[in-house]
Amino acid sequence: MWQKDLVEALADLPITIYNPRRDNWNANLEQRASNPKFNYQVNWEMNRLEAADTIFMYFAPGTYSPITLLELGAFMDSGKMIVCCPDGFYRKGNVEIVCQRNDIPFYHDLPSAIEKITAMLTLAGNAAEKPVI
């Protein structure tokens, strides 16, 4: 999984990584604001996106990623985005144009994106840097 590759690449840096993926997440959970478990998870994710210094988004080929698209729209003006969207993502053109219009670093492949974010955070050398995966 791409998250594991990124975490391994960043493992030696003095940073905090917020990863919203949960092994025990119930995908059939009722998705309503009134559902306490769902509400908690969504708010946890949004709070971490707001608190992060760097937000990394990956649009995996063959997926739809509606929440990632929503979050891209919500944080496109933040100045803290890095986006990777390879060929095969069904809305790659839309993602690429949003990134161009908002000066968001955009990568077509995961190895290039991981190399860039690793170099960027290494140069920053700041323990307060918090990429969001």
Image (spheres, rainbow, N blue to C red):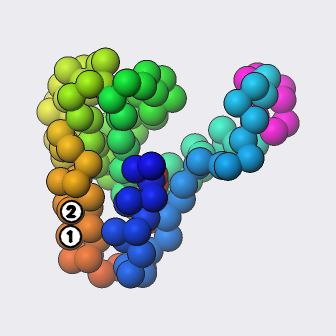
Q: Give the residue type that dot 1 points to.
A: Ala
- Magenta residues, start to end: 31-38
Q: Which amino acid does label 2 sit on?
A: Glu
Pick the residue in front: 96 or 46: 96
Name the one closer to the observer, 54 or 93. Answer: 93
Task: Give yes or no for contact between labels 2 and 1 (Cβ–Cβ under 8 Å).
Answer: yes
Image-based side of 128 in relation to 79, left or right:
right
| SS class, disc 1 | helix
Is 35 included in the stretch rendered in magenta?
A: yes
Q: Residue 118 location in percent, x, y?
A: 26, 68
Q: Nearer the viewer, mark 2 or mark 1?
A: 2
- Main SS of the magenta part reads loop
Would residue 23 be visible to someone looking at this image? yes
Residue 18 x %, y %? 53, 59
Query: Which residue bears the numbered disc 1?
Result: 119
| In the depicted structure, whether residue 132 falls above or below residue 63 | below
